[in-house]
Image (cartoon, rainbow, N blue to C red):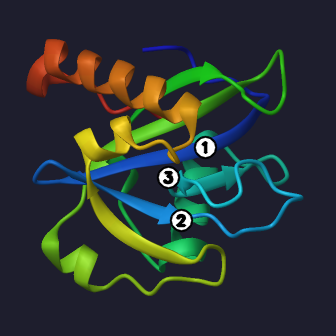
Amino acid sequence: MTEPSTDFAATKLLLMRGGEMLTHLRDEIDSIPYPGHWDLPGGGREGDETPMECGLRELFEEYSLTLPPERLTARAFPSMSRPGLFSWLLVGAITEAEIAAIRFGDEGQEWRMMPIADYLAHPRSVPAFRNWISAALGQQLSSGPKATPARP
């Protein structure tokens, strides 16, 4: 596991259930990165929050979901928006009950559980996240169930 950074740009979440992952379609606003693309939950850091706090706050703001941190593992990747900094990907599973409890916020056009393979091949998925997901799933598959939850 990469050591947690005290200075980072953002946190995204890869939340999966039965071969699908939680996604949302970004708004069609020219001033945002990747308008109209399929995105992951998460966003930019606020104040001095940790990567975990950032990701869980964004998940609540965007989907009204609260997950316990111990259900998530973390991996750092070079930031797309802020060269020289890292962004974090939190990886975990969500339950059918959590999916049913989603109340989508006002950022984005719609949400859906998308097959992971479809996201990885989709021409309007955020390109860097395809690489992040592939790397995280490769690591998860090779490390098996012994992956240690990170405390970023």
Name the quarter where the N terminus is drawn.
top left
Residue shown at 26% from the left, 75% from the top: 99
| Distance from the alpha carbon under mark 2 to that under mark 3 | 9 Å
Kind of residue indicated by mark 3: Leu
Q: Quadrant of residue 67?
A: bottom left
Residue shown at 46% from the left, 48% from the top: 13
Please tell me which residue lies in front, 15 or 70: 15
Q: Position of residue 49 (x, y in %)?
A: 72, 49
Residue with the most extreme right position: 31
Q: Quadrant of residue 50?
A: top right
| Distance from the alpha carbon under mark 3 to that under mark 1 | 10 Å
Residue shown at 78% from the left, 21% from the top: 85
Q: What number is the disc on residue 40? A: 3
Name the quarter where the C terminus is drawn.
top right
Mark 1 lies on residue: 11
Of labels 3 and 1, earlier in sequence is 1
Please tell me which residue lies in front, 109 or 43: 109
- Residue 152 in view, yes or no: no
Kind of residue indicated by mark 1: Thr
Residue shown at 53% from the left, 65% from the top: 25
Q: Is residue 65 above or below residue 40?
A: below
- Residue 134 in view, yes or no: yes
Q: Position of residue 48 (x, y in %)?
A: 81, 46
Nearer the observer: mark 2 or 3; the answer is 2
Q: Is residue 28 above or below residue 56?
A: below
Mark 2 lies on residue: 25
Nearer the observer: mark 3 or 1; the answer is 3
Give left or right: position of 28 versus 65: right
Q: Kindly state the secondary structure of the residue where label 3 is placed.
A: loop
Of labels 1 and 2, earlier in sequence is 1
